[in-house]
Amino acid sequence: MRARRALVGILVLAPAVARAAEEGAHGESTFVWHALNLALILGVIVYFGRKPILAFMSDRRQTIEQGIEAAQRELAAAENRLAECNHRLAALDREVEEIRSAVRAQAESERDRLLADARVAADRIRRDAQLAVEQVGRRAREDLRAEAAEMAVRLAAEMLQRQVGDAERARLVDEFVASIESPPAAVRS
């Protein structure tokens, strides 16, 4: 609306300015004509270019507002991701502590189990050693008895040889042979 008024004003003033230019000095009239031409060109540009310029400015404003809104959404999303990362980090610290506690408990349990196994093995070794000692003692007693019996038999044989003469030996051999040749009393009946 203003552009139309300006254009009408310029068109009305143009003849008056032209008359004044004819009457006045030549240097001033050139300036006025230049100013008039500039005003006329600006009026035409404003009249015909106003809508495209306003549309461009409106589109530009809308694009900038959309960019700002997108940046705000991205900022909110980044803040949410940051909060989630902080939450995960706090949860990670708790999880690490839980894992450490579980590992400590498992290590203590394993230590207790190993100690119990070692005690059982030590008891078994003690029992086996005690049994081995007892067996060695029994064998040693048996060996001693056998050796004592052998010695007793040898000593008795030596004593018999010294005390028993040839006649006595012949009589003992005859008795032995007779006892072997005659059947035992239980067989006779």
Image (cartoon, grey):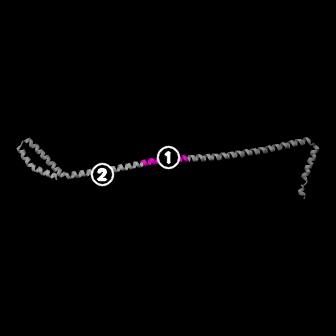
Q: What's the residue type where badge 2 is placed?
A: Gln
Q: Specify the label residue 148 is tagged with.
A: none
Q: Position of residue 79 (x, y in %)?
A: 38, 48
- Specify whether 68 is left or right of 176: left
Q: Position of residue 31 (x, y in %)?
A: 11, 43
Q: Say which amino acid is labelled 1.
A: Glu
Between the residue at mark 1 and the residue at mark 2, the CA separation in whole angstroms equals: 46 Å
Q: Which mark is residue 66?
A: 2
Which SS class for mark 1? helix
Q: Which residue is mark 1?
A: 97
Splitting the image into 4 quarters, where does residue 32 fall? top left
Image-based side of 77 in relation to 131, left or right: left
Q: What is the residue that sits farthest to the left in this orientation? A: 23
Q: Secondary structure at mark 2?
A: helix
In the rendered image, residue 103, in percent from the top left (x then y), is placed at 53, 47
Q: Answer with mark 1 or mark 2, whichever residue precedes in sequence.
A: 2
Tell me if residue 101 is in the magenta stretch: yes
Asked whether 98 or 63 is in front, the reply is 98
Main SS of residues in magenta: helix
**Where does residue 81 sit, x and y in percent of width and height?**
39, 49
In the image, what residue occupies the spot 90% across and 51% down? 179
Q: Quadrant of the C terminus?
A: bottom right
* Front position in the image: 142 or 68: 68
Q: Nearer the viewer, residue 146 or 19?
A: 19
Which residues, given as a range, are shown in magenta? 86-105
The residue carrying pointer 2 sits among few (fewer than 14), some (14 to 19) or many (20 or more) residues within 10 Å by Cα, namely few
| Total numbered labels placed on residues in the image | 2
In percent of the image, x 60 and y 46: which residue is there?
Answer: 112
Kindly report which numbered mark, 1 or 2, lies closer to the viewer in this rendering. Answer: 1
